[in-house]
Amino acid sequence: METMIIPHHGRRVDCALYRPEREGKCPMVIISHGYNGHASDHAWLGEYLAAEGIGAAALNFCGGGNRDKSGFPTTQMTLYTEKQDLLAVLDEVRFLNWVDKTQIYLFGSSQGGMVSSMAAGERMAQIRGLILKYPAFCIAPDWIKQFPRPEDIPEEIPFWDLTLGRAYVETLYDLKWEELAESFDKPVLIVHGGADEVVPVSYSEQAARLYPDAVLHILPGEGHGFGEAGDRRVAEWTAAFVHTGDRG
């Protein structure tokens, strides 16, 4: 594993690169962590994919968690700043001399799944497929339910050990995740826990109907954050998807 730092939009996103020990160009999976997460949360996936001959790039979203070292304030982070971070990584890894730019996949967990779907919709021609692990398509509906009008939003919002800013919610009113799903015509793999109490599995069931080419796996008993067995299945499905197109 090596670290790559990418400057963009006046900030710097760091990324953990996992390179397979093989000759020639490799497929690449760009991994996006969830809310208040970190690239190291997906070290297990990066290591697994590299052992399977697949490159991986796990990024840290600027201001996206308490372990982020970019200096970007959490109060300025939004889904759209995270999308910019992800696209900056995509623009960089596409031109690494060991990456096959025709085989780039986006992988996102929870909020990272929402952001990955946004980025994939914008760069559809550069993406081979999308892997979503309990994607948080509930973000906009949940926050808008809490703050029905922009004038209701406070300047700072303490939430799950992170202090968000007004912009995080203010930028959600025009976000229509259903339209993102309907317009993305590349293959999609979705994995969700049947016991998820944070993001209802109904969102992934709806997404599987909206995406033109999606496969959904629901893991009974798994919540928002899988156990070792659930993560192992995610890793195996991801590798098979990249290698053969098989989504289980």
Image (cartoon, rainbow, N blue to C red):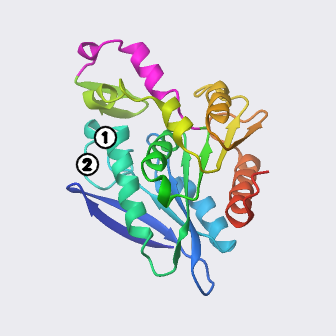
Q: Are marks 1 and 2 in contact (CB under 8 Å)?
A: yes
Q: How far across and down, in percent of the image, does residue 147 sit?
A: 35, 14
Secondary structure of the residue carrying numbered label 1: loop
Residue 192 falls left or right of residue 66: right
Q: How far across and down, in percent of the image, does residue 13 sit?
A: 33, 59
Q: Callout 2: 10 Å neighbours few (<14), some, many (20+)?
A: some
**Residue 148 visible in this rendered orientation of the protein:** yes
Residue at screen point 72% across, 36% down: 222
State whether residue 147 is above or below residue 14. above
Residue at screen point 47% across, 28% down: 139
Q: Report which residue position mark 1 lands on.
A: 77
Numbered disc total: 2
Q: What stretch is highlighted in magenta?
A: 135-154
Which of the pair 104/213 is nearer the observer? Answer: 213
Which of the pair 231/237 is nearer the observer? Answer: 237
Residue at screen point 40% across, 33% down: 161
| Residue 5 placement: quadrant | bottom left
**Residue 66 visible in this rendered orientation of the protein:** no
Residue at screen point 76% across, 57% down: 246
* Sequence-wise first label, 1 or 2: 2
The residue sitting at the bottom extreme is: 23
Marker disc for residue 12: none
Residue 202 falls left or right of residue 94: right
Residue 46 is a magenta residue: no
Q: How far across and down, in percent of the image, does residue 226 sit?
A: 68, 42
Q: Report which residue position mark 2 lands on.
A: 72
Kind of residue indicated by mark 2:
Phe
Q: How far across and down, in percent of the image, does residue 136 sit?
A: 53, 34
User: Marks 1/2: CA distance?
Assistant: 8 Å
